[in-house]
Amino acid sequence: MGKLGDILARQDETITMNSHLHIAPRVQAALQNNQAVVALESTLITHGLPYPTNVETALAMERAVEETGAVPATIAIINGKIIVGLSHEGIDDLGQEPPGSVRKVSRRDLPIAVGLGESGATTVAGTMIVAHWAGIRVFATGGIGGVHRGAPFDVSADLYELGRTPVAVVCAGAKSILDLPLTMEVLETQGVPVIGYGTNELPAFYTRTSGIALDACVDTPKRAADVIRALFALNLQQGIVFTVPVPEADAMPAEAAERAINQATAEAEAQGIHGKAVTPFLLARVAEITGGESRRANTALLINNARVAAQIALALSETT
Ligand code: PSU
Ligand code: MN
């Protein structure tokens, strides 16, 4: 943990909210002045993409948020301290940690990482919890977790977190490595609105369409902000999912994506991969099988989602 220890030393000063939560001053200032802030997760850095693509993509997401006029806040746990607004050096150090050495942190893992002074990368679920503590209402990621294909009992903690924590998650739908119809059923049960951003259909992460119709669609940041504002005005406690299709130029052909996903899923099963290891395994295998094509789609949609989330956060800050 030597290198990660240095992150804390080099993290620009943080404002300590309590003994566990540390917010970068630029993030805290933006929140106090009701300026737009976008939360970003760290599991995609440690578990979703290999080095150096992970660091390049995380920094490109921060840049996309900044260029749009909002403040990025990458969230991670370093030696038990929850950081909101990890420094660029911190992102680089985290991205260079050997695979498997940093804990993947959802709700159940938070007391372990904090209590034992470990470092951790927050998932969608973990990032939502911390963003909500910090007062951040908009969060950009790639795809939310969901119900796994062939294993309907393996339901991502992301879906239950969306049912209990009021944060707007901007994503490219659920990863198509999942069972999308079952994922939508669980979100419905959890009371989570899934809203197409410029589409009536649930995007399938690597591809723009899934054949699954959505109940609502918004076309502008302002309309998205209107829904988020209503969520908070009504004091509802669930999250909202905004789904943005992967940019056309970076989308994968549906058949190629489907074939790779089926093969990777079968391999995961044959190798007895389960629990929190499933999603990282599938993402990596699909990338290998498709000769990196899926990874290009993944990085492109991450950066695009960061930009859209920043536009929504800006609209939200303008009208409150
Ligand atoms: N989006 C990406 N890459 C990722 C993830 C999302 O483009 O690696 C991560 C998120 O952190 C999400 C997690 O919460 O995958 C889902 O893991 P699981 O299925 O074990 O809940
Ligand atoms: Mn799972």
Image (cartoon, grey):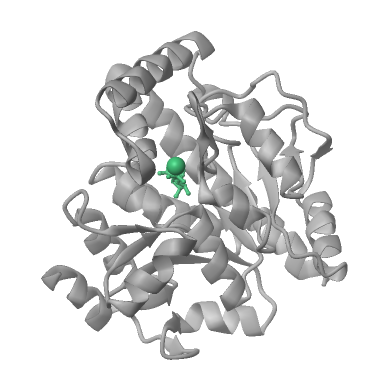
Q: Which residue is drawn at 38% across and 47% down?
A: 57
Taking depth in this image into account, of 191 and 306 the one nearest to the observer is 191
> On the picture, is 154 further left or further right than 182?
left
Taking depth in this image into account, of 186 and 36 the one nearest to the observer is 186
Q: Dividing the image into 4 quarters, which one contains the C terminus?
A: bottom right
Q: Is residue 291 visible?
A: no
**Given the current orientation, which residue lies at the most extreme left position?**
2
Q: In this view, does 225 lie above or below 212?
A: below
Q: In which quarter of the image is residue 136?
A: bottom right
| Ligand 2 visible in quadrant | top left
Q: Is residue 281 visible?
A: yes
Q: In this view, does 318 lie above or below 188?
A: below
Q: Which residue is drawn at 57% across and 36% down?
A: 174
Q: In which quarter of the image is residue 184?
A: top right
Residue 56 in the image: state x and y as whole percent.
32, 49
Q: Which residue is drawn at 46% across and 52% down?
A: 61
Q: Is residue 198 above or below residue 16?
A: above
How many badges with numbers are in the image? 0
Q: Which residue is drawn at 40% across and 25% down?
A: 294
> On the picture, is 249 further left or further right than 223?
left
Q: Dividing the image into 4 quarters, which one contains the N terminus?
A: bottom left
Residue 182 in the image: state x and y as whole percent.
63, 30
Residue 55 in the image: state x and y as whole percent.
30, 52
Q: In which quarter of the image is residue 318?
A: bottom right
Residue 200 in the image: state x and y as whole percent.
78, 29
**Given the current orientation, which residue lies at the most extreme front position?**
153
> On the picture, is 127 further left or further right than 33?
left
> On the picture, is 310 further left or further right than 117?
right
Q: In this view, does 248 lie above or below 25?
A: above
